[in-house]
Image (cartoon, grey):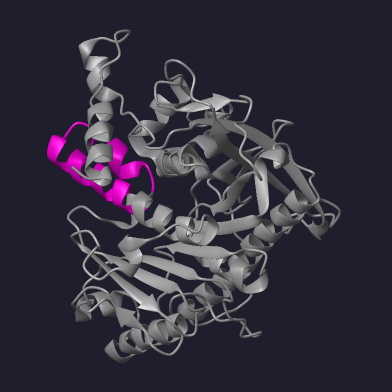
Amino acid sequence: MNHLQHAFTAALSVVFALSPCQTEAQRMSVPTLPVPSGSYAIGRQAVHLIDSARADRFATDGKRRRELMVYIWYPVRRPVGQLTGDYLPGAKQMDETSSVQQVMRGEFESRWPLIVSGSIRSHVLANAPPATHPGGFPVVLFSHGLLSTSFAYSAQLEDLVSHGYVVVAIEHTDAAGAVLFPDGQIRAFRRPTSALSGDPLQQMISAMHDENEIGAEDVRFVLDTLEKRELPLVEAMDMQRIAAVGHSYGGTLTARACQLDPRIRACISEDGEVNPIGAFLDYPDHALLTQPFLLIEIDRPPPSDEELTHMRETREQWEQYLTRERQQLESCEAGSYRAVLRRPGMVHGSFSDEPVFTTAQESEKASEAIGNLLLIEEINRAFLGKYLKRQAAPLLDKHGDAPAGVTVEHFAKQTPRANTSGDPRR
């Protein structure tokens, strides 16, 4: 039995674990996060940041500055017995405002009341003393999807931390579903009205450029703050080993942050490709990625004519999109990859906790959801381990070692090659 199978067996057993403090009906209705597969326990601290150099784009007086909440997830020496902590700090306060409650119910659906009540738990030990490691742990800057929150990716973040990474998760104000600040202010999702008129596609692309630039600057501001040693726990971090990871919108802004900032040593976009543009957005500066890049994509068959009509896209535009995506990936730094995932139950939300939570009552679907999440975690660890820890990555580099349902394509500037057979595009 390999490492992934061991982790899968442990994770599945936890999803169906029953707490002795609940009735049978309650036990069957509360989903549980998989136990992280690494040797460290997980600590978490909240940090409030204000970027004095950037104005709040929704401020009416022009004086308010850009505010962010950042949550630092970090390795802790594992205590005797596994404690649990809040899944989403501040959920009760968010639930008290009807408009915010509506947004968060849209994100978490039937799970939201369980999060508010504290029934759904994480494996976090709030404000616990960090573990020590010579030179500090490598750092991962994490960005969530649009209308989401980094807490929706708790399983993925916990797993990284358990393997010896510090994860600095950024709540991107206005792009997140809701952000609670220490003064009680809650900022729910909102976006500015596009200044463009006419073509809806161009309006969408313009809005994406704007939002991704803001998100990329959030990442760079947090990195600046870390370098100035103005955040707690910096003594546990190795500032020479920094990566950035994001899902969906977070993946797209992460690619932009990596284009702009060579301090980031490795970059992962989780299903953050942009139809009809490519693997990432184009900008007037034509900046290239100068660090290894990993794009993890969910396999999607070519759209039907009906779907293209709904997307307001022609077959020719779709083919141009695929061509442009490949051209962009071939322009990336040597040592970049694309991993295409073709497995039952694998969807855009598989990078988050959602499928694990929503399928907890159905053993077959729960097995799929957990297996998919563990696979994503393994791919991420292989890439980050290679570039931040100098570890071998046979999953990425050796022909035939990719798990079933995964195609890994290696880009080396001029000579891209695939390590599994078949068309890796979609």
Q: Quadrant of residue 111?
A: top left
Q: Identify the image quadrant of the C terminus.
A: bottom left
x%, y% of residue 390?
A: 50, 59
x%, y% of residue 312?
A: 35, 80
The answer to whether 393 appears left or right of 201 in the picture is left
User: As displayed, is residue 400 above or below residue 127?
Assistant: below
Residue shown at the point (51%, 80%) measured from the top left:
202
The answer to whether 315 appears left or right of 353 in the picture is left
Work out whether residue 106 or residue 220 is closer to the camera in this orientation and state it. 220
Work out whether residue 316 or residue 143 is closer to the camera in this orientation and state it. 143
Work out whether residue 402 or residue 30 is closer to the camera in this orientation and state it. 402
User: As displayed, is residue 311 above or below residue 394?
Assistant: below
Instruction: Give the magenta-colored segment's residue range.
Output: 352-376
The answer to whether 307 appears left or right of 284 in the picture is left
Q: Is residue 241 magenta?
A: no
Dominant SS in magenta: helix
Q: Is residue 359 magenta?
A: yes
Q: Quadrant of residue 134?
A: top right
Residue shown at the point (39%, 35%) measured from the top left:
36
